[in-house]
């Protein structure tokens, strides 16, 4: 049997009924011509709606297309007659292209990691949602018919997302088993109505039904506070219970609507910071001395759906710093998060350290950081809000060895004292200033032949037994940039695997 479109949507039913009404009206001379004309316009509008939605919706993946074709080509009546299925399964029940992409989009928007699907049929909806889940996500599909699991599994196995799906056959719960006893289309509809009514009457959840195809039910658990108010339970109604200003802790870590910049963001720690801030919801200005590197990172963020821009600037130059700040304010109207990360490091024995090396190191690491803090701080003080995060170093606490880096160590100690001073001066005006002190970070340069002996020495000094990864620092910058850290200022957050403790 060849694949053909299944006429199963409410719009298609309306088109059929309107067409029949128009034909009856056209055959009756007593019906006013105006009514016939209105019916024709209604048919024309309705007839094109489903096709337009199909055309404008992102194409389905190849495994989904194959699964749809396999489903509508299958003789389900014959499968029921042969006893392969307990119930007669109408093709109208299949999740279609638009509905599948809607489910996938909802999974993305809700940032779901675990999904429970009650009633899978041939798995089109399950696979659609699995495509929207992260790599570590999982979907449990409850299906009464073992035959359907065997029907869908080969397609799941072809998809890179099929591994996220686990099909459980048998009854999901006693209530659903009772509702599933009906074996006709009308009774199926009554069972669904009864199920929806059951959900709507449960005070623990709230529900909305989207009238797409045969309907998508969105159900979420209500807040504990709302549930307790309904059940009149006695609770301690405070910010611990409800969240600060009604926002639970993970929501307080979000940076939606915030504007951030990261200097030295073209590579390494700065690149990781830019991605972290963007993933948490901020708009991000990627600032770097190297234009191509800044543009490359901004493109990475854009591909992830993050609003980003690139700015080329040398933070050791006051004009560049002010231009950077002016560009960001001009583009986005504010600066909420200033991540001053750019820095340099040159190694030499103290007796051999030249004034040129000293001045160049301090010009970027300390003077540049100060100029960025000051320029961004002026904007933030006018706003009455801001988070400044400077990148210091474990070298601000200890003297790393065996490398010799007097200029670097001293400049990073200066960054910590700069942070502490600004943090105390500005907190009562809404601006918090903190810094992060990473340990030795694993970069491609560290794996060079010349540095290999040093790596072994460093590892022997680190209780964690490994070097830091840039991803080890990402949560810290999001925390310091968020409302969750509002009471922290002037703090040096050390992330070094315990190296400074020995």
Image: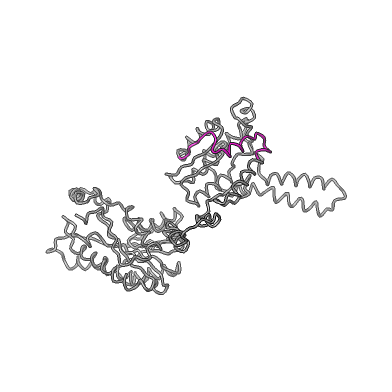
Report the quarter where the C terminus lies: bottom left
Q: Which residue lies most toward the top here?
A: 82
Against 302, residue 385 (above or below) is below
Nearer to the camera, 159 or 187: 187
Asked if residue 170 lies in the magenta stretch, the reply is yes
Q: Is residue 66 visible?
A: no
Q: How is the image coloured?
A: one colour
Against 370, residue 173 (above or below) is above
Against 229, residue 156 (above or below) is above
Q: Which residues are magenta?
A: 164-188
Q: Which residue lies most toward the right here?
A: 30
Tell me residue 93's x, y (percent).
Answer: 62, 39
**Residue 231 sits in which quadrant?**
bottom right
Q: Is residue 436 visible?
A: yes
Asked if residue 193 lies in the magenta stretch, the reply is no
**Residue 407 sits in which quadrant?**
bottom left
In this figure, what is the number of numbered marks? 0
Report the quarter where the N terminus lies: top right
Report the side of 217 relative to 462 (left or right).
right
Tell me residue 391's x, y (percent).
Answer: 30, 62
Report the side of 458 relative to 433 (left or right).
left
Tell me residue 199's x, y (percent).
Answer: 59, 47
Tell me residue 307's x, y (percent).
Answer: 45, 59
Report the side of 90 relative to 130 (left or right).
right
Q: Residue at x 55, y 49 (%)?
A: 219
Nearer to the camera, 46 or 436: 436
**Residue 259 sits in which quadrant?**
bottom left
């Amino acid at each position: 049997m060849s694949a053909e479109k299944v006429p199963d949507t409410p719009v298609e039913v309306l088109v059929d009924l309107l067409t029949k009404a128009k034909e009856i009206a056209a055959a009756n001379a007593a019906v006013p011509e105006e009514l016939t004309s209105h019916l024709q316009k209604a048919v024309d509008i309705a007839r094109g709606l489903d096709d337009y939605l199909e055309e404008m919706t992102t194409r389905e993946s190849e495994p989904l297309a194959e699964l749809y074709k396999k489903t509508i080509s299958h003789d389900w009546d014959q499968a029921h007659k042969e006893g392969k299925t307990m119930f007669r399964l109408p093709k109208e029940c299949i999740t279609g292209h638009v509905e599948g992409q809607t489910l996938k989009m909802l999974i993305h928007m809700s940032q779901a990691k675990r999904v429970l699907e009650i009633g899978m049929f041939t798995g089109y909806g399950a696979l659609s949602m699995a495509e929207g889940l992260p790599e570590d996500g999982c979907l449990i599909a409850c299906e009464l018919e073992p035959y359907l699991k065997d029907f869908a599994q080969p397609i799941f196995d072809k998809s890179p997302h099929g591994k996220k799906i686990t099909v459980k056959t048998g009854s999901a719960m006693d209530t659903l088993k009772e509702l599933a006893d009906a074996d006709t289309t009308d009774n199926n509809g009554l069972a669904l109505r009864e199920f929806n009514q059951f959900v709507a009457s449960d005070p623990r959840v709230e529900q909305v039904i989207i009238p797409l195809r045969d309907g998508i039910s969105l159900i979420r658990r209500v807040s504990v506070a709302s549930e307790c108010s309904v059940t009149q339970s006695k609770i301690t109604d405070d910010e611990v219970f409800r969240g600060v200003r009604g926002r639970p802790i993970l929501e307080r870590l979000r940076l939606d609507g915030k504007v951030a910049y990261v200097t030295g963001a073209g590579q390494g720690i700065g690149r990781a910071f830019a991605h972290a801030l963007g993933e948490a919801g901020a708009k991000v200005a990627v600032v770097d001395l190297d234009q191509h590197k800044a543009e490359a990172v901004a493109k990475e963020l854009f591909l992830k759906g993050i609003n980003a821009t690139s700015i080329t600037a040398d933070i050791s130059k006051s004009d560049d710093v002010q231009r950077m700040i002016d560009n960001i304010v001009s583009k986005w109207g504010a600066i909420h998060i200033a991540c001053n990360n750019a820095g340099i490091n040159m190694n030499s024995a103290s007796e051999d350290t030249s004034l040129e090396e000293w001045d160049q190191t301090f010009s970027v690491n300390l003077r540049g950081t100060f100029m960025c803090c000051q320029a961004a701080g002026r904007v933030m003080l006018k706003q009455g809000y801001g988070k400044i995060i400077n990148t210091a170093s474990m070298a601000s606490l200890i003297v790393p060895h065996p490398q010799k880096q007097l200029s670097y160590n001293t400049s990073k100690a200066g960054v910590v004292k700069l942070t502490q001073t600004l943090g105390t001066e500005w907190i009562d005006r809404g601006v918090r200033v903190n810094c992060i002190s990473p340990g030795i970070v694993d970069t491609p340069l560290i794996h060079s032949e010349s540095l290999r002996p040093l790596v072994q020495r460093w590892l022997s000094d680190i209780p964690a037994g490994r070097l830091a990864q840039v991803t080890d620092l990402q949560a810290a910058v999001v925390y310091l940039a968020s409302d969750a850290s509002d009471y922290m200022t002037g703090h040096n957050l050390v992330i070094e695997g315990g190296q400074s403790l020995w």
